[in-house]
Each structure stands twice: as C-alpha cells, then as structure tokens.
Image (cartoon, rainbow, N blue to C red):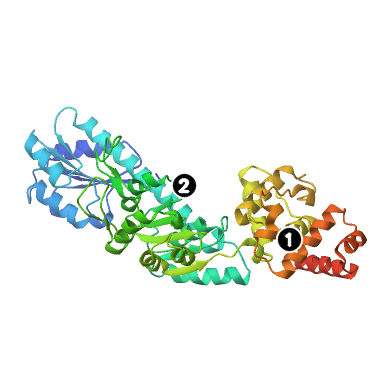
Amino acid sequence: MDTSFRIFVVEDDPTYMRMLRYFLELNPDHEVHVFDTGAACLDKLNLNPHLISLDYSLPDMTGEEVLERIKHYDQNIPVVILSGQQDVETAVKLIRNEGAYDYITKSEDFRARLENDIKQIKQKIDLEEEVDQLRREVVAKYEFSKSVIGASPAMQRVFRLMEKAVRTNITVSIHGETGTGKEVVAKSIHYNSTRRDGSFVAVNMGAIPRDLLESELFGYEKGAFTGAVTRKKGQFELSDKGTLFLDEIGEVGLNLQAKLLRAIQEREIVRVGGEEPIPFDARIIIATHKDLGEEVKAGRFREDLYYRLLGLTIELPPLRDRGNDVFLLANSFLKEFSKQNGLSSLLLTKEAKNKLLGYSFPGNVRELRAVIELAAVMADESEGILADDIQFRSIRKEDAFLTEELTLEEYKRLIIHHFLKKYENDVIKVAEKLDIGKSTIYRMLKEEKEEVEQAG
C-alpha cells in the first residue's frame, strides 16, 4: 500500500489498550491512534481511519452508540467490536443490522482474529485501489483525442456532436458502415460522461439468436424455461447507473421491439418468467449500419421505437470520405502495435502512403487496422513500411466499383490506380487503355503526392 494503514483503538481498559497498541505497532506500516472514550474517537474521524477497533463497554457511551455514529459519518469505515462478553445475539445484531465488520471476544485468540480482519481489509483496499486505477486508465484511454482519431471536416462534426452528447443523458443513435468505429464512439461518450463510474454494457443484437435475445436483455427467473436453474440478471439490469449500448439494433424482430419500447419508455423491465417490474437507470446508445427510416417504411421496424431511439444522431463517415485521416489512423495503429509487440518505431514511406490513399477501404477503420498490423510484421525495421508491405485482402475490393458510394473523382482515381497496377505503372499504356491523356494521370499522381506531403 502507498500510505500507512491507520487504526483507531477505542479502549478504556489500560491493559488491553497497551496490549493492542504494542502488537499493532509491530507492523511499521500501521499508524495507531488510541482513545479511552467514544467521544474522543468520534472527534477524530476526520483523520479517516482504515479500521476502528471498538470496545463494546465504554465509560461515556455504549459501543453500539459509537458504531451508529461512525456509520453515520462514513458507512464504509470497518469497525471491529471487542467485547469481554461472548454474546452471540448481540454479535449477530451488530454485524447484520448495524454494519460492524466483526465481533471478537477478548479471549486468547482475539489477536489472531484481529490480525486476520486487518489482512482482509488491506486486501479489500488494495483491490479497490487496483480497480480505481484500471478505471482511470480506461477513462484516459477513451479521451476523445486518444480514442477517436481524425482531423477531417467530417470527423470534426462527429467530435462536436460527441461533446454535446456527454453533457446530458439523451439517447444517442450512431449510424455508419460496418467497421467505422461505432462502439469506440459509444465508449468514448460513456467514459467522458457523468456515468463513467458505472458499467458500459455492450450487446450485439445481431450476434445473439432471436429466441435467446429477450432473456439476454431482460434476464430470467429460476424455472422460467428448461435450463434456467438459477435467476439471471439481464443486460438492462447490469447497465444500471451506466450505459447500455445496443449495437445493430436494426436486427431485432418486431415482437421484441415492442418490449424494448416499453422498457425504454417506462425505465423498467420484467425478467422472463417473472412478474415484478424492475427499474433501471441506464443511458441508452444504439448503433446500426442500416437506414432505420427505410426499415420503418418497409415495415421491419416500429415507428414508435424509431422515434424513441432517434435522440442525438451521429453519422460516422466511411474511411474513404475522411481524406488524410487514413494516415493519422495508420500511424496510431503502427505506434500501438509496435509498442505491444516490442517492435522498433516504424514509419510509412511515401509509396506506402500513396498506396493507402488509392484504396477505398470497404472494411473501413477495422480493415485499416488489420492492414497496418500485417504491414508492421512484414516490414524491414531499417526501411519502414514499404508499399509492398501494404497488402489488401478485402473480400469486397473486386466489386467496390459497384457497391461503394464514391464521388466521380474517387472512382476515377480507383480506376487509374487499378490499371497502373495491372500494367506495372506504364503511364503511356494506361492512358491508351483508358483513352485519356497522359497529363491526366500525371496530374492525379502529383496531387496525391502533395496530399501525402501535407499529411506529413
């Protein structure tokens, strides 16, 4: 532990006080304060003791009265009652009803019992500190500037909306193609909001069989169906005080949509096989790659649920519309992967950047990460990331011309790069095949080179 372990000893018997102080101070990490009255102890609670050893019989008030006032000040302070009488009924009452940590009789083994309590309390404090540290690391990881990377105008609009989202508990709906980073944005909103200390619970609605989705979301009671041998909380309950992220919400069937609507409107759920409504307090963030408006028109999505979920809408642009963001992301992925795998710092060569810029990335940011991680493995550390280290394996790249919504200029670049690759950068031959002037190709290559240089 980083600081001393502060112990209050409240004891009016001088012999026991000296005995307790002696053996407690054998541990140099212990900071022991002794008091012979309850009032004296209560007066120093601002020192925030880690443990209070409290005699049950004091001259000014009973141990129960002191315990009650300690718990009123801070219910998390562990209080161990020491008593000269073995009274099971009193012990049960003090521990179960009044919040005492333990009840120890002043017998031959009281020291061992107290040492064991101290050991357990220290372990609990260490665990809480570890959890707090992990929480701080997660919060830092999902700072906007670290988790969502981009400088393009399209991403600046996303950042502005994210900043608005963290100020309130409004429902957020995130739209975008697969691989654009919808869950990363959802996590960033959660960990930058007032709910950051609560749980972030993510449910991929499209990955769970429809006949299991209701019990996954709402939980179930014991005996609700074959195999329900115990009660289980659902994701709505688990996200209480935090954020519930419903990914691919467009995959939910109409029957469950009605129950989702009621749960979100009433802020309560009923477990499968149960009758009692269970309230929950969670911020709802949904995501989908589908156009929910079109799903409503087609009769596949309830209109009332659509409007209930709409909230603040954030449209994530595909990577092909983010310009030089591809280099910012690539460098970030390179740095992260190299650090995790003990590799030397690698840089993208201009040729590699040109190759990245000429590709449409149908798999978006997720595909870019995979491409960059493979390139880091393939690269020679002394040369950096070369064009040959960049390998595209998208199963959609051959039909990208038909399925991707690109601008005319983007289509032109893709076609020219396709033929340059096919004819080994023979500009004259490509110009002949496409029936365009050589100057058109040279101008495009020059513009791309300038874009790469501007990106650093």
Q: Is residue 329 above or below residue 54?
A: below
Q: Which mark is residue 207?
A: 2
Q: What amino acid type is highlighted by mark number 2?
A: Ala
Residue furthest front in the image: 298
- Horizontal side of 289 relative to 402 (left or right) equals left
Residue at image x 24%, y 40%?
A: 21
Residue at image x 68%, y 57%?
A: 400
Q: Which of 422 and 49 lies nearest the eye of the viewer?
A: 422
Q: Give the structural element (helix, strand or loop) at label 1.
A: helix
Picture quadrant where residue 420 is located: bottom right
- Horizontal side of 134 relative to 360 (left or right) equals left
Q: Position of residue 67 (x, y in %)?
A: 15, 49
Q: Which of 184 and 53 lies nearest the eye of the viewer?
A: 184
Q: Which residue is mark 1?
A: 357
Local crowd size for mark 1, using a 10 Å CA cut-off: few (<14), some (14–19), many (≥20): many
Residue furthest top in the image: 108
Q: Position of residue 162 (x, y in %)?
A: 48, 68
Q: Give the structural element (helix, strand or loop) at label 2.
A: loop
Mark sitting earlier along the chain (2/1) = 2
Q: Is residue 118 above or below residue 250?
A: above
Q: Which of 296 and 291 lies nearest the eye of the viewer?
A: 296
Q: CA distance from mark 2 to mark 1?
A: 33 Å
Q: Which of 142 and 450 lies nearest the eye of the viewer?
A: 450
Q: What amino acid type is highlighted by mark number 1?
A: Leu
- Horizontal side of 245 relative to 340 (left or right) equals left
For the N terminus, which image quadrant?
A: top left
Observer-side mark, 2 or 1, equals 2
Answer yes or no: is residue 413 visible.
yes
Q: Position of residue 145 (x, y in %)?
A: 55, 63
